[in-house]
Amino acid sequence: MIISVSNLKGGVGKSTISRNIAVYFAAKGEKVCIVDTDITQRTTCEWKQRREDAEHRVDVFPMSTMTALPKDIKTHRDNGYSVIIIDGVPQLEEVTTKTILISDFVLIPITPSVDDLKSFEKFILRYQDARAILAGTREIYGFVVMNKYSGRNNEDLEMKEALGLFSAQGIIPLNASIADRVAHRRSSKYGLTVLEWDDLKAAEEVKVLCEEIETTLIELIEQ
């Protein structure tokens, strides 16, 4: 199973969500790795280095090159990783398209802002390109998750309603959402996630999201 967490915009929580999903599946006994596609920052690779004493094993590999990304993924599958999560890089449309093409499940984090909505519209073009390339061979499943979302103001609610309009393009909003909680930053400081931290509300939000992803994947596989 290959899950990509991708968006053309930075600061939407791709790395945070990638790590939490990875720890969730690792805790369930899956052999999990993350592919860090950010060849300049390597923030998830650095997170892994801070994670030496963590209970649940999550391996992190840097993407070698944009061209070699599909080969990287095949290598990890051949090495027995049952869940491979691609931590997407912002702005590089070539990487985004390649990532979508090799994924089973594309998760697009977005925050409730007009800037993110505009960026999301550009991402949809890459998503449609990938679907056109794969037409008749296999399906890609795309889902959007609201991050840093409170649901307590008109802007948040309007944004969630607007995302529902993109279902026609094959991208479905998930019911689960993630609030902007300091626990995400604090846990990351120690190479952990909120699933391994002491903020129960933050952990429950992530658990609900991961359970929805898992349930959706099972339903898609059984179709």
Image (cartoon, rainbow, N blue to C red):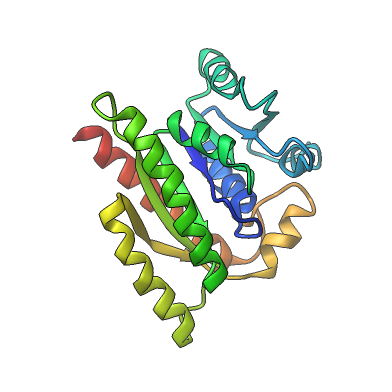
Question: Which of the image's four quarters has the N terminus?
Answer: top left
Residue 58 in view in this figure? no
Q: Work out whether 85 lies above or below 82.
A: below
Name the residue located 73 percent from the left edge and 53 percent from the top edge: 188
Q: How many marks?
A: 0
- Which of the two residues, 43 or 99, is positioned nearer the viewer here? 99
The part of the image, by quadrant, that contains residue 26 is top right
- Which of the two residues, 130 or 104, is positioned nearer the viewer here? 130
Q: Is residue 67 left or right of residue 219?
A: right
Q: Percent position (x, y) of residue 192?
A: 70, 49
The part of the image, by quadrant, that contains residue 52 is top right
Q: Percent position (x, y) of residue 44?
A: 71, 42
Name the residue located 50 percent from the left edge and 39 percent from the top edge: 4
Question: Which of the image's four quarters has the C terminus?
Answer: top left
Name the residue located 47 percent from the left edge and 25 percent from the top edge: 82
Q: Work out whether 173 lies above or below 153.
A: above
Residue 71 in view in this figure? yes
- Which of the two residues, 57 or 209, is positioned nearer the viewer here? 209
The part of the image, by quadrant, that contains residue 161 is bottom left
Q: Percent position (x, y) of residue 163?
A: 37, 66
Name the residue located 27 percent from the left edge and 30 percent from the top edge: 135
Q: Residue furthest left?
A: 223
Q: Percent position (x, y) of residue 76?
A: 57, 19
Q: Work out whether 67 lies above or below 16.
A: above
